[in-house]
């Protein structure tokens, strides 16, 4: 029997068993997980390869700017630059009048990695929606300045596979929720 298989593979050089084609980053239909992971150099380097591609927009519910707290003279949108270092990430915000402030988010030791297959019809490859969620204390300057650090969550999101790569993230959201500040900024990302 083994000789017959060896002969078959000799005559079919392009044939590779399906299991051998599996990739480490591929998702299976129905993939869903949420795990807490230690933040390392790989994740930071992939995030550093991203840049904002749209203005930072200020989230507003039905009550508009009246429900925004902790920003002096809040605007609906800001020009934004993102600076990533080994110690953290900063959003530098400005508008037509000039600099408005910076929001500096030191990297926490851990983050939450969430992924779910959104193509549950079983047709085609899984479409995995992914989030990296970072929680910590944010320092702010300018129009966003507070008396001290405020509680914040940074979420990077997008569609990809089950490996953390820059290609998997095309959106960001920074939520600040503290006694002295309540606001959320969000925007899009692309590779630098």
Image (spheres, rainbow, N blue to C red):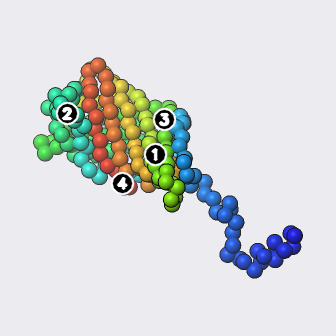
Q: Are marks 4 and 3 in contact (CB under 8 Å)?
A: no
Q: Which numbered mark, 1 or 4, is in the foreground of this view? A: 1
Mark earlier in primary sequence (4, 2): 2
Residue corresponding to mark 4: 190
Tell me the quarter of the picture where residue 73 sits: top left
Tell me the distance, in whole angstroms, between the alpha carbons under discs 4 and 2. 30 Å
Q: Which numbered mark, 1 or 3, is in the foreground of this view? A: 1
Compared across the picture, whether 33 is left or right of 141 comes to right
Residue corresponding to mark 3: 111
Q: Which numbered mark, 2 or 3, is in the foreground of this view? A: 2
Mark earlier in primary sequence (1, 2): 2
Residue corresponding to mark 2: 62
- Decide: few, some or many residues near mark 2? Use Cα within 10 Å; few <14, some 14-19, many ≥20: few
Circle 2 SS class: loop
Tell me the distance, in whole angstroms, between the alpha carbons under discs 1 and 3. 13 Å
Q: In the orientation shown, which residue stands out farthest toward the bottom? A: 11
Q: Nearer the viewer, residue 174 or 131?
A: 131
Residue corresponding to mark 1: 130
Tell me the distance, in whole angstroms, between the alpha carbons under discs 1 and 4. 15 Å
Mark earlier in primary sequence (1, 3): 3
């Amino acid at each position: 029997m083994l000789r017959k298989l060896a002969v078959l593979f000799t005559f079919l050089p392009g044939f590779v068993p399906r299991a051998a084609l599996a990739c480490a980053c591929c998702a299976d239909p129905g993939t869903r997980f949420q795990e807490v992971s230690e933040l390392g150099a790989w994740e930071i380097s992939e995030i550093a390869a991203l840049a904002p591609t749209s203005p930072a927009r200020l989230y507003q519910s039905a009550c508009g700017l009246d429900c925004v707290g902790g920003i002096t003279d809040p605007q609906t949108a800001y020009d934004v630059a993102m600076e990533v270092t080994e110690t953290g990430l900063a959003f530098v915000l400005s508008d037509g009048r000039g600099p408005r402030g910076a929001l500096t988010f030191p990297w926490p030791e851990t983050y939450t990695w969430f992924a779910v297959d959104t193509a549950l019809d079983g047709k085609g490859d899984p479409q995995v929606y992914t989030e990296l969620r970072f929680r910590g204390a944010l320092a702010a300057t300018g129009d966003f300045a507070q008396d001290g650090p405020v509680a914040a969550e940074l979420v990077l999101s997008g569609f990809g596979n089950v490996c953390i790569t820059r290609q998997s993230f095309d959106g960001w959201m920074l939520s600040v929720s503290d006694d002295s500040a309540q606001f959320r900024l969000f925007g899009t990302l692309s590779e630098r």
